[in-house]
Image (cartoon, rainbow, N blue to C red):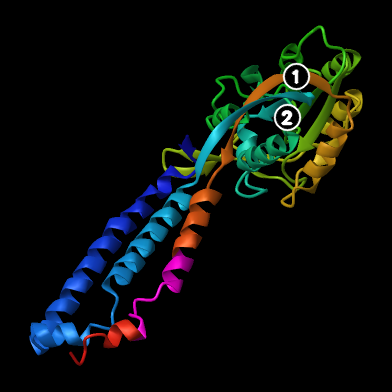
């Protein structure tokens, strides 16, 4: 037996509190009556009250509250084991960690916006296995393909722009590392999703995408940023500053949609521009859902039968019985011996 809401167990404290309040109230009423009239007069005045019925009503009220508290805690018992097949597509997400992702032309900045979009994408993928590759001039696997979306989110939130020692951007290297994350024996059901501002300083991203397409990998790119661009903020010795080139000029980073479109076209996928509304994620999920699915294994689930209905029903019976029981004596018993 287990409880669905053990954090609500504090409600059970209401039962002894109610018992103490009822006992205190009865004692106080008795003392107040005795302070006005004597014991003999009190007996005559209360002769019409059925003391046994009154005790029953109080007991039923306390029992009803107890059953109601138990129902709120959510008792469960009756364990059932079931097996479920998980089917889906292997998806590797590539996240750009170059300093240009700190630009704030999309709020709060490109990286945080991409992180949020990746979280939404992972939620939408459901039973698909998902992996994470982070890259700048070099790339590495931050999270291998997994069904544990919680672990991926934890690793996703642990990275930030500038973490990688070699700056610059190599989409080619990112795609190569992403491709090596898949099972080489599979010829289908592989997807790479690239979140980037499209600035590619090193390598041939389109060539790497074409090679992966030959291996059955579909590549989708999502552009993060604006074509107007923005300066790259940095934390300098005097506080907040902006990145400069070797000549001392401020560097403005712009979204390069052409590069991202070329990579998506070579990878037989599609390009999407990231927006605040997130409609592009729905379109991307529709494309991924249209791919053939493979079996990703079986998973056992333990389920418990909800039994809160039993104490809830008992509580209802107690409250109804409390309302139906009268603490008034019958008329003939009330007057019996009154004139003796």
- Label 2 secondary element: loop
Q: Quadrant of residue 304?
A: top right
* Residue, disc 2: 127
Locate residue 305, reporting x and y percent.
59, 38
Instruction: From the viewer's side, name the closer residue of 197 and 178.
Output: 178
How far apart in space, not on screen, are marks 2 and 1 (Cα)?
A: 9 Å
Q: Quadrant of residue 294?
A: top right
Instruction: From the viewer's side, name the closer residue of 296 and 325.
Output: 325
Query: In the image, which residues are magenta?
Result: 319-331
Vertical order, 125 against 310 (above or below) = above
Q: Are marks 2 and 1 in contact (CB under 8 Å)?
A: yes
Vertical order, 265 against 26 (above or below) = above
Instruction: From the viewer's side, name the closer residue of 154 and 84.
Output: 84
Asked if the stretch drawn in magenta spans residue 185, the answer is no
**Left or right: 328, with 80 as reference point:** left
Residue at left 82%, top 30%? 220
Vertical order, 166 against 53 (above or below) = above
Locate residue 285, reporting x and y percent.
81, 37
């Amino acid at each position: 037996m287990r409880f669905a809401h053990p954090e609500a167990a504090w409600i059970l404290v209401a039962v002894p509190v109610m018992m103490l309040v009822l006992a205190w109230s009865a004692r106080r009423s008795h003392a107040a009556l005795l302070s006005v009239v004597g014991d003999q007069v009190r007996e005559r005045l209360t002769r019409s009250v059925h003391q046994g019925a009154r005790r029953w009503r109080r007991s039923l009220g306390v029992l009803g509250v107890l059953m109601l508290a138990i129902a709120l805690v959510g008792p469960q018992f009756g364990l059932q084991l079931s097996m479920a097949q998980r089917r889906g597509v292997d998806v590797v997400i590539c996240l750009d960690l170059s300093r240009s992702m700190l630009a704030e032309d999309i709020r709060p900045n490109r990286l945080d916006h991409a992180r949020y979009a990746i979280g939404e994408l992972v939620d939408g993928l459901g039973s698909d296995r998902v992996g994470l590759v982070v890259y700048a001039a070099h790339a590495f696997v931050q999270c291998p393909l997994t069904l544990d979306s919680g672990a991926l989110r934890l690793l996703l939130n642990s990275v930030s722009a500038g973490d990688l020692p070699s700056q610059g951007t190599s989409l080619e290297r990112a795609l190569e590392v992403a491709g090596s994350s898949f099972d080489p024996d599979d010829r289908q059901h592989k997807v790479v999703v690239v979140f980037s501002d499209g600035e590619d300083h090193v390598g041939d991203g389109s060539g790497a995408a074409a090679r992966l397409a030959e291996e059955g990998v579909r590549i989708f790119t999502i552009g993060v940023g604006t074509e107007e661009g923005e300066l790259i903020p940095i934390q300098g010795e005097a506080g907040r500053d902006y990145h400069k080139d070797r000549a001392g000029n401020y560097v403005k980073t712009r979204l390069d949609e052409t590069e991202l479109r070329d990579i998506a076209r070579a990878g037989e996928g599609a390009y999407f521009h990231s927006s605040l509304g997130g409609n592009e994620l729905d379109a991307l999920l529709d494309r991924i859902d249209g791919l053939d699915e493979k079996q990703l294994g079986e998973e056992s689930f333990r389920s418990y039968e909800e039994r809160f209905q039993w104490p809830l029903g008992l509580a209802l019976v107690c409250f109804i019985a409390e309302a139906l029981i009268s603490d008034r004596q019958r008329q003939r018993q009330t007057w019996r011996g009154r004139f003796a």
